[in-house]
Amino acid sequence: MSAEPVVTGAGAIGAWGVERRALHGALAAGHPLARRVEGTPDAATVPAAACAALVPVLDLSPWLAPAHARRMAMTSRWSVAAARMAVEEARPGPRDGGRTAVVMATAFGSVWFTERLVRQVLDEGPQAAQPFYFSECVANAAAGQVAIAEGARGANVTIAQREAGPLIALSQAAAEVREERAEAALAGAVDEMSPLLHRLLDRYRALARGAAGRAEAPRPFDLRRDGVLAGEGAAVLLVEPAATARARGARTLARIRGTGSAFDPTATESDWGEGVETLAAALHRTLRRAGVAPEEIAGIVSGASGARRGDALEGKVLRSAWSGRTLPPIVAPKAVVGEYGGGILACALAALDGASFGRPTQLTEHDPQMGIDLHTGSIPHGPILVSALAAGGAAAWVVMDRP
Amino acid sequence: MSGADRAPLPPGSIVITGLGAVTPFGWGVAPLWEGARSGRCAVGALDAAPAPRSRRATLADRFAVAAAGEAVASAGLDASALAHAGVAFGSSTGGLIESESYFEDLLRRGPRRARPGLLASQQFDGPGDAVARALGCTGPVLTVTAACVSGAAAIEAAARILLRGEADTVVAGASDALCRVTYSGFNSLRAVDEKPSRPFRKDRAGLTLGEGAGVLVLESARHARERGARVLAVLAGAASTCDAHHMTAPHAAGAGAAVAVTRALTEAACDPADVDFINAHGTGTPHNDAAEAAAIARVFGGLARSIPVTSTKALIGHLLGSAGAVEAVVTVLCLARGEVHPMPDDGERDLSIALDLVLGLPRRLPRARVALSTSLAFGGANAALVLRRPESAHVR
């Protein structure tokens, strides 16, 4: 019992907007899509991160009726709109909604609504809680809303595994299709960034900050990396069996060759660990499952984001997995689109689509511990490895190609 | 045992070898079983939590680690046996109770006095990661956050990891702590009863919220056999669906829940007639129980009147994301001990619900072979688990 899972539709919303061309343009430019977060202090006076890759005000009405949108948190709105884009692109034809699964990932859920609900309860008392906020602040609200919008009555799962969540969600969706429990699956990730969450991440020194002579920017694998660019948005992919896609002549955006995940128990609750060998062995298994040797990987879409320990671990894991062989071209699109919100899924598809990756504009010099020189230009045709290592210990990989 | 992939396994080859729980009956499986079979309602305060392992551990983390520790000890697994194990965990709120403290500090004492660590602890994956870290697991680790089906969905996810051959052992479960925001939220939906909940009874008026954790050790049957483990039950089938109907209300006819049950039975190669008892989601809300009874009637037809049905929530309340995991633990215990725990015999019979409710006293079912545990949730999610007694199961 096995059906080859392929991606035939995708929708994504991020700091670049909704247009795929805009994302490709941003990746080519290599400049972080950073905007100032409301209420952040002036970095010249207070050392603090001020920017995030925030979603601009968008007209989502082509995919989501305003009357419906009003009843949703922003995370649900973005997810439903992205899912609709994916379905429109895939044009899957008549489906058995009972066998359409939804697998979403989120790191923080609907933080705006959660903050409002908590403030209501603590400030005004339990009776002040608004049911609307409550039902939309549960972490699986976005997945539930996608299911309602698309009539998807198969499994409905929300994965929370921080930075590794989007790839785990895609893996779970691929498994639903491969193991023939679902005839289609909508897989993706969503997150939003509030000023409070942004401040919190900054208090933990997770975010890139500006410094004398250095602009605030994420610097993946760079010697002077000092944190990530927080991001927000949603990405949803439609996954279905290759045979179904072929039968109706659908365009295949990606074939999911193999997936894998692992855990590094040396990680602390809020940082990355040092389990290089453990994760490299798991990465090897992932490649074996995909039927791809390391030297056959045409390129790596890395989850490196400028996190001090995270990038160090990822670089060492890749080096170890390739055992001294030359690494394939590596790109780190989180330098542009930021961390969280499913941007890595959209960027992985962009890589398969031949998008050109510019050199991140704020890099200074290589970290000699890793010696990873980010690739510029398109990734050659062939299987790519998408990699994500999460703070807290989780790691996930997906091998995909475009047939 | 190594981290290498194994050959994929057929359904029915996943066994349960260890159990752990933290519930309103106390810390451990023994007080849970003793309390459950007594049929007394445990709604009240939890015992004081033991000292945390880490300054950053949330209450939900502590529940999770304690229950997981008990489960792996009862399975006879040591650290080396767990090194390549996976963890599939559920949580609906993570460390929301600690985040609440942060907001309280922020509102009452200002931003300088609020400790950001409290807010940072509100990670949904906190309990599952804490378990993986505490046990030193390096296999696949994932957290499912699907409101009240989180626990059952995590158990299904664990089974899939094993069936794919990605691990020999997966620690599966869920943990949640109850906080004011959760209580206020359910209250705003008019879903909370002031009295202990009375699932499926005519005067049922809502749920009783609770907190805790339930953990099961799942292994491939081959792995359990090779190490001579005691098998408590077989996880014969599991399935999830979504109503795709409403964010907070179940489908009135229980359509999605019925499909989940049917698919889980199919995976378990069981007919409805094979099911000896049901541990229902049974929250005690008017809508949920009516929809669930309709789902049971849809699947079991005339048999629905004669299959004993219980709801653990009548005794310990609704443990949120951990409900499905704790109820799976209880269902395994019922199968293993040959009796179904009762619900308090409070309230009047609802004539519109034609179920054989287990009330007042435990129901002896020494020959029970197959049990069903169901979970329903916000967002329309449904999950069903089919469990078998090992001596009657065809363990492949």
Image (tube, grey):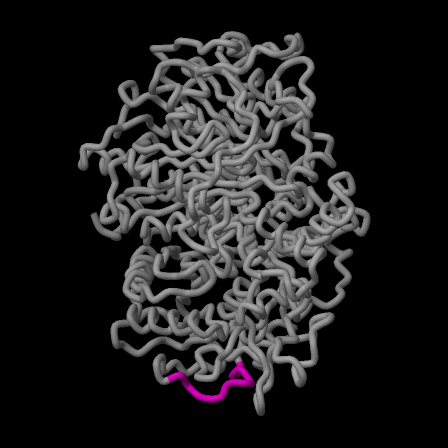
Query: Residue B66 occupies which quadrant of the picture?
Result: top left
- Residue A359 is one of the magenta-drawn residues: yes
What x and y, as percent, mark residue B202? 67, 13
Query: Residue B252 occupies which quadrant of the picture?
Result: top right
What x and y, as percent, mark residue B172? 40, 40
Q: Could you tell whether A278 is left or right of A191 in the image?
A: left
In the rendered image, the residue lying farthest to the right is A67
**Residue at screen point 31% across, 58% down:** A282
Q: Who is closer to the viewer here, A107 or B32?
A: B32
Q: Could you tell whether B378 is left or right of B9 in the image?
A: right
- Residue A15 is one of the magenta-drawn residues: no
- Is B370 drawn above or below residue A181 in the view shown? above
Q: Who is closer to the viewer here, A34 or B71?
A: B71
What x and y, as percent, mark residue A63? 73, 54
Q: Could you tell whether A84 is left or right of B36 in the image?
A: right
**Residue at screen point 46% across, 31% down:** B326
What x and y, as percent, mark residue B189? 73, 34
Q: Is residue A75 visible?
A: yes
**Residue at screen point 58% across, 90% down:** A212
Q: Is residue A88 visible?
A: no
Residue range of the region highlighted in magenta in the rendering: A358-367
